[in-house]
Amino acid sequence: MPKVVIYPGTFDPITFGHIDVIKKSLKLFDKVIVAVSDSENKNYLFDPLERIEIVRKALFSDLKLNRKKIIVISFSSLTTDLCKKYKSNIILRGLRAVSDFEYEFQLAGMNRKLDNKIETIFLMSDVENQIISSKFVKEIVKLKGNVKKFTTKSTIKSLKRKYE
């Protein structure tokens, strides 16, 4: 049976930090489900369909990653329910800095309480990408700065269109 991992997030927008985590997970798992959150408790720059399209373009058009190993979906359920749907018992989370750990630790604990068969694993992006956050990328683009070092070409185009 193939080993499937669920990588949930907002991806608003996807960054090289997210992409590092996805690339590393491809070495460990047969299939990576990139699950774009459709939660309504955040103010997103991009709607769910836009974020899915941005992620797909970044991964498959810009970076030419393996379409057979990555599925990009939208979800509005509990991540543990998503795990059941895709027959996965592993949730993948990315860590950038120590400040992320407390929130991620609590989230992993809650998911474990919801379903004790599910494990959360953490991967860190490469050092040069650990400081990147979607929030900062959006702010830099809004202020007409250069974000080439932070995300893919197609993502930058989508960001610039939003702020024109």
Image (spheres, grey):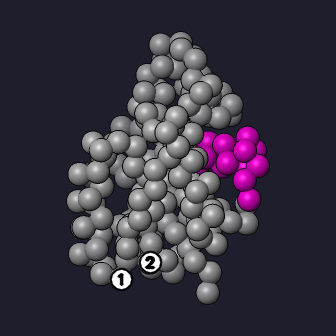
Circle 2/circle 1 CB separation < 8 Å: yes
**What element does badge 2 sit on?**
loop
Name which residue type carries label 1: Lys
Q: Earlier in the sequence, mark 2 or mark 1?
A: 2
Query: Horizontal and vertical percent for residue 162?
Result: 55, 25
Q: Residue at x 62, y 54 (%)?
A: 23
Between the residue at mark 2 and the residue at mark 1, the CA separation in whole angstroms equals 6 Å
Tell me where residue 2 sits by quadrant.
bottom right
What residue is pinned by disc 2? 89
What residue is pinned by disc 1? 117
The residue most toward the bottom is 1
Magenta includes 158?
no
Query: Horizontal and vertical percent for residue 8?
Result: 45, 58
Q: Is residue 47 left or right of residue 151?
A: left
Magenta includes 56?
yes
Q: Main secondary structure of the magenta part?
A: helix
Q: Residue at x 30, y 81 (%)?
A: 116
Using the rendered image of the protein, determine whether residue 7 is visible from the camera's viewpoint. yes
Q: Is residue 116 above or below residue 128?
A: below
The residue most toward the front is 127
